[in-house]
Image: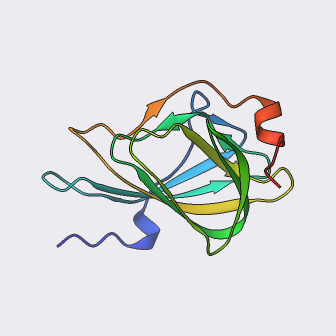
Amino acid sequence: MELIPANERQVQKSDRSWFTGEVWLETINLAPAPARHRAVHVTFEAGARTAWHSHPLGQTIYVVEGVGVIGTRDALPRVIRAGDSVWLPPGEEHWHGAAPDEKMKHISIQEAESGFVTTWMEHVAEEDYSTLAE
């Protein structure tokens, strides 16, 4: 068993290569092999978001606070709120982040495949970010 006290978890600012705006990442768990589970608590300041990306084994997002936006290549972005869960299947290209005028916090859960978790792509265009589904 490994216990990680709350005050010992690392919180780091996101890499600008993969995010737009202010985003903070707090690792909840990076399970050692043979386990593949990874969980991260992510805080997005208003208007902040990921770049386009996908996960080889999919991703679950659970919104814990605020209002966010999530988009895929084949659908208009949708609003997500505290308490919402989103499942993104393996390989689905998507992005997610805070609404333009509200902070959002979510827990991101995914598995690594051969140590690999995310394929990062281009940043989300402003017109894609600002066009919501009805």
Q: Nearer the viewer, residue 111 or 128?
A: 128
Q: Is residue 108 above or below residue 17?
A: below
Residue displayed at 76% across by 35% down: 128
x then y, percent, for residue 47:
79, 46
Residue projecting furthest to the left? 34
Q: How many marks?
A: 0
Residue projecting furthest to the right? 101
Quadrant where the image shows the N terminus: bottom left
Residue displayed at 52% across by 36% down: 93
Q: Is residue 30 left or right of residue 108?
A: left
How is the protein colored in the picture? rainbow
x then y, percent, for residue 32:
19, 54
Q: Is residue 102 left or right of residue 84?
A: right
Q: Is residue 93 above or below residue 23?
A: above
Residue projecting furthest to the top? 122
Quadrant where the image shows the C terminus: bottom right
Q: Nearer the viewer, residue 47 or 85?
A: 85
Residue displayed at 24% across by 53% down: 36
x then y, percent, for residue 82:
67, 72
x then y, percent, for residue 29:
34, 60
Residue displayed at 48% across by 40% down: 92
Q: Nearer the viewer, residue 4 or 44?
A: 44
Image quadrant where residue 13 sits: top right
